[in-house]
Image: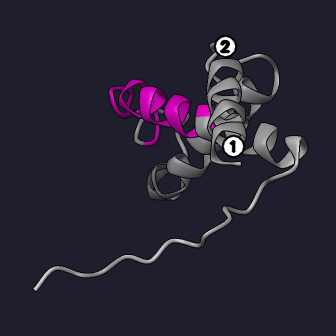
Amino acid sequence: MPLAVTLPLQPATQAPAALRQAAQAFEANALNELLKPMFDTVDSAHGAFGGGDGEEAWRPMLVDAVAKQIAAHGGLGLAAPVLRQMMQMQETAR
């Protein structure tokens, strides 16, 4: 038996600042996925100057922080079209 999904009659509208933040977070997630393979190919944790298993354990947080910084400073330009589409979808839903 398929699950029934109920949607509200009036969709909640979000403030432009919240939409901008969501678009930037989306871009940061996309950048995170693009950066993961780059960091996975370098084994600096077990080299002469590496941090060992501790560095390897914390690497995903480093990649996430780098992706957020890139997105916050312009990124790939992905946030702007995502934001436009989100605003358009919100206007259409009204």
In the image, is 71 to the left or to the right of 3?
right
Type of residue at label 1?
Gln
Q: Which circle, 2 or 1, is nearer the viewer?
A: 1
The structure residue drawn at horizontal position 67% and vertical position 33%, both measured from the top left corner, is 66
> What SS does tag 2 mark?
loop
The residues tagged by marks 2 and 1 sit, at their Cα atoms, a distance apart of 21 Å
Type of residue at label 2?
Gly
Is 80 placed above or below 25 here?
Answer: above
Q: Nearer the viewer, residue 16 or 88?
A: 88
Name, please, the residue furthest toward the left: 1
In the image, is 53 to the left or to the right of 92?
left
Rendering coords of residue 49 (x, y %): 55, 34
Name, please, the residue furthest toward the bottom: 1
Residue 17 picture quarter = top right
Identify the magenta region: 27-45
Is 4 placed above or below 20 here?
Answer: below
Q: Which residue is mark 1?
A: 90
Residue 62 picture quarter = top right
Q: Nearer the viewer, residue 73 or 62?
A: 73
The structure residue drawn at horizontal position 16% and vertical position 79%, both measured from the top left corner, is 2
Rendering coords of residue 67 (x, y %): 63, 33
The structure residue drawn at horizontal position 48% and vertical position 33%, both measured from the top left corner, is 48
At label 2, counting other C-alpha atoms closer than 10 Å, the crowd grade (few under 14, some 14-19, many 20 or more) is few
- In the image, residue 31 lies in the stretch drawn in magenta: yes
Q: Which residue is mark 2?
A: 77
